[in-house]
Amino acid sequence: MNLAITLLVAVAIAAVIGTVLKQNQPYADYVLKFGPFWFEIFKMLDLYDVYSSSWFLTILTFLVISTSVCVYRNTPHMLRDMRNFHEHAHQTALQRLAHHAQWQSGQPLKHSIDYVSALLRHKRYKIKQLDSKGGLLIAAKKGAGSRLGYIFTHVAIIIICIGGLLDGNVPLKIAQMRGDIEVETRRIPASEVPEKSTLPADNLSFRANIDITESKAANIAFIDFKDGYLVQKLPFTIRVDDFRIEHYESGQPKSFESDLAIIDKNLSAPIRQTISVNHPFSYKGYTIYQNSFGDGGSLLKLALHPLTGADSKAQEIEAAVKEAHPIRTAAGELSLEIADFRPFNVNPDPTGVKKFRNIGPSFQFKLRKANGVAYEYLNYMQPIEQNGAYFYLSGMRRSPAEPFQYWFVPADADKRPDRFLNFLAALNNPDRLNQVATATAQSTENSKNLPTAEQQKVAEFMIALSRQFTEGGNERISAQIEKSVPEAQRKQVAELYATVLHQFLINVYLSVLEQEGMDVTQPASDFDMRFFENAVNALSVAYQYDSPVLVTLNSFKHIEATGLQVTRSPGQWLVFPGCLLLAVGVFFMFYLPQRRLWVIIKPEGEKSSLTLAGSALRNRYDFDKEFELIRQDLTQKLT
């Protein structure tokens, strides 16, 4: 019993871990969540797959053996005890019980016997009478079902544990230990996965996932295992005829469901079934759940806006999600790898109102260099309002462990990034800069009276200052000042540089407005000046955006895919009845307590004497009250 209790506590602790810690995720997710050190510790303890870990299955095995031995040893004794009235109890032994009483009755022996028997039957006791040394012993009992509760509870534990062993991938672990299977870690087509990483269709138990695009079909699924995956063959084909998502007004997904067709060579026609969350479909012992949804290879029309060089003309391409596309940029040839596309992005309302709003489509991609280094980006299709102005958001991170750092590119009056990109192209155009710098030097109060050679030096200084700004932001200029200017003069020089840079950037910006056809002799509007401030802020951090192009989304054709989970769990047909049996057993144990009463009635002339005794296995407080009521009833009626 002590061993069984210890094992049950260990199973309970393991269940808590398996509930709190999400199971069977890719190892990379755990590394990001816990860090390399704790990842290795938890991996060594098999906490990422608790219910299939060797130590958990060993505990279940020992628990089955221990509980089975307990049931084997105690069941015969309990069955005999259920049938036994213990009618051979001696009066001296009964008087030593905690519950006992004796008194003289003024009633004849037969009357006393009849009344005691009737009272005990009324109290739902089964009775048995036996002659006992000049008198009569009435043995009574009720609640024999509590013994059945003990048997049911322990048998239920055995059944549930066996069900857990069946669904615990024991054959899979044994096959891995023997080297019969190998985990596949490469991201390759399923047709190229070797046989050693492929499981047969008659695999006893598994839990696998598969994403299927609308109108497509699959007869395999993927099991996340250790640091890779295994391919699980299915004895039938699943085809997705249609996938539907219902949204709230905010754009949040409300519900989603799939129309499936099960194609089996043993069927004359496909079985058609619609599944949704919490409404799976079972076929041949396999259960198909609606697990998730994702992109099924949406077609995107993208524009690649150069961020370097004097040309702001965008390159337009068509790309598909989950595919790589080579692109040519000023930094050389890169691989554009579209990872995901989302037609809706629901975020909390920035005004603080307790509601959500849809900020439109987004797409996630990587730009991979020839040396294999890749940075990840998350761009939104539509400009997003921030403090009364609109910005195109482009997030970048250098590794999946980092959060996205967003670059806010201001949108022009047409809610396009064109004006900002033209502004950036002008700052990257040496001829344009030289023209604006010369004109600025000739018109500034402090330099217009200088000789031409001196004005040219002022112009060159402006160009150099702007180049430092675009290549390294204000940090680059500050670093140059600290390096070349004495400390006592740094503040004054920094203010001078800021004034010169600001004036030069305004003149470059005005040249862009003039190129758009605006009359720059008139004062700029509030919108144009605010746009300038936002553009300068964006330029000050542009050097951190490690990409030669800004990728925007012009249009898309959304193709959806449903995420299905296919399981085979033969153990559930043991676990479910086992849980029911456990509930029945616990009910019998706690609500049908075993109670016994003994009444010895002896004749004394025309009267009789009575000895009442009782015992209970549990719920002593309730039995105290019941015993006292029976004693009072008998003493009142039989005195």
Image (spheres, rainbow, N blue to C red):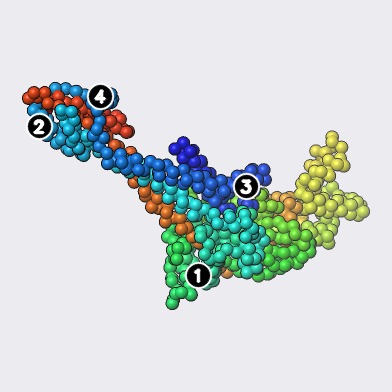
Q: Which residue is mark 3?
A: 43
Considering depth in this image, is 486 or 500 the residue closer to the camera? 486
The amino acid type, in three-letter code, at marker 3 is Lys
The answer to whether the residue labelled 2 contacts the one labelled 4, judged by CB atoms less than 8 Å apart, is: no
Label 1 and label 4: CA atoms lie apart by 75 Å
Label 3 and label 2: CA atoms lie apart by 77 Å
Q: Which residue is mark 4?
A: 92
Q: Which residue is mark 1?
A: 236
Task: Report the number of discs.
Answer: 4
Secondary element at image label 4: helix
Pinpoint residue 361: horizontal percent, then vertical percent. 58, 61
Name which residue lies at 46% across and 49% down: 161
Look at the picture and state if 580 lies above or below 626.
below
Query: Which is nearer the N-term, disc 2 or disc 4?
Result: 4
Secondary element at image label 1: strand
Label 3 and label 1: CA atoms lie apart by 35 Å
Name which residue lies at 63% across and 45% down: 44
Look at the picture and state if 399 lies above or below 71.
below
Q: Which residue is mark 2?
A: 110
Look at the picture and state if 384 lies above or below 617.
below
